[in-house]
Image: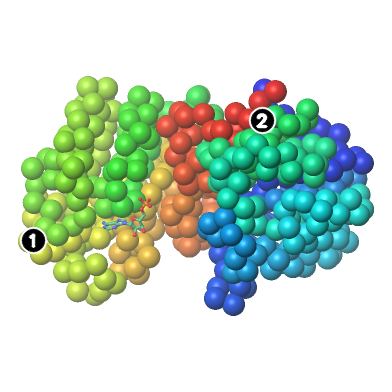
Amino acid sequence: MIRSITGIDVAGKRVLVRVDFNVPQDDSGAITDDTRIVESLPTIMSIVDRGGVAVLMSHLGRPKGTRDPKYTLRPVAEHLAALMRSRGVAVNFAAECTGAVAEGAVAKAPFGSIVLLENLRFHAEEEANDAAFCEALARLGDIYCNDAFGTAHRAHASTAGIAHLFAERCAGLLIMKELEYLGSALANPKRPLVAIMGGSKISGKIDVINALLSSCDTILVGGGMMFTFLKAKGLNVGSSLVEEDRIELARELMQRAADAGVQLLIPTDTIVAPAFADTTDNRIVSVEAIPDGMMGLDIGPDTQKRFADVIRSAGTVVWNGPMGVFEFAHFQGGTRTVADAMADATASGVVTIVGGGDSAAAVTQFGHAKNVTHVSTGGGASLEFLEGKALPGVVALES
Ligand code: AMP
């Protein structure tokens, strides 16, 4: 069983919380998107409002085990302090995540306040899940709480190794929500269950497609990976992205889908361009007529319409990966249409789940983050969850 932070008495206690404050920053260090900080506030407030100290730990970027000032969490502490000012909650920054500096900051923090520790990944021991590092971190709290779903698929010190050192351990509200939505989507879905798979390659998503083949009614395939499927069907794909070493696998997946009675829908048209660029020099072609030297960068309008119809008539939809190169204005139509259809479907009662990463960025970009049932905060973690794998950061919370 996994307990929620809300069911734990935190008054007069120090709660060591693993948050995901890995926020994007510009060259000057300014935070360009504070969604991750804002989303962690319910868990943080649940601690400080009930008279506990929230001792927050996170990673930021990839400093590779050394203290690199570019990746300091200090600007994040300042941002959090600004968000907390109107609530009258003090935020202190500890310039170390373990040792005397961190222990001193935690000891002097009044109940009802927040301490943010410096970047965990300044120490190689974090990703190595080092036992002594876990113990050093564990000295900073009476209760352990994990609310960083985005790193829950990694067995690091702060996400996994540390948990057993606490008699009381729990999940924060973000992880509880992920478990509720991703868990029920698969365990007990409202049918038909439709999965939309996109993104660049099949290779990173084989396990999830395999797992979905045994649970879904329909799988829609878009993005770069569609061309490996088209090639497996014997079609010419021009200079589109193809994983030659996965063609056989694509063929097997299509056969498995047919055997299992799962509809695997591959696009019938695509938008091609002569180069990987955001160019007006593009046109719609049937997938049976992709010219040599042209590459497909989005799904075409017929496919967009067909996918949108399937989404609107689903019971549950799980989406992972963009339908095209949505970073380019000329090739974002497919991804936008899917995002719009997800929003429409949600309004008429379909359960819609966006599996993190690029698809989460896309629904946000198209203004639909609030118009779907659930946007997962973890790309890799949500994929592994959908694959049916146990997430180390979640397993470690079990009591
Ligand atoms: P992934 O990380 O595998 O989910 O892939 C996401 C990336 O796939 C995005 O950056 C998209 O630009 C890219 N992508 C989507 N469709 C295509 C395509 N047709 N050709 C090349 N890249 C694509």
Mark closer to the observer (2, 1): 2
The residue closer to the viewer here, 128 or 395, is 128
Decide if residue 351 is on the left or right side of residue 59.
left
Query: Which circle's residue, 2 or 1, is located before the other in the chain?
Result: 1
Q: Which residue is drawn at 50% across and 24% down?
A: 188
Residue 387, above or below 40: above
**Relative to the observer, which residue lies in front, 37 or 136?**
136
Q: Which of 294 and 124 is in front in this view?
A: 124
Q: Which residue is drawn at 55% across and 73% down?
A: 26
Residue 373 left/right relative to 226: right
Circle 1 Cα neighbour tier, 10 Å, few/some/many (<14 / 14–19 / ≥20): some
Whole-percent x, y for residue 1 in the image: 67, 22
- Residue 219's place in the image compared with 122, above or below, is above
Which residue type does callout 2 highlight?
Answer: Leu
| Quadrant position of residue 191 | top left
Which residue position is annotated with label 1? 291
Label 2 to label 1: alpha-carbon separation: 53 Å
Residue at x-position 32% and y-position 37%:
206
Q: What element carries label 2?
A: loop
Mark 2 near ligand 1 (CB under 8 Å)? no
Which residue has dot 2 on it?
A: 397
Name the foreground residue: 134 vs 199.
134
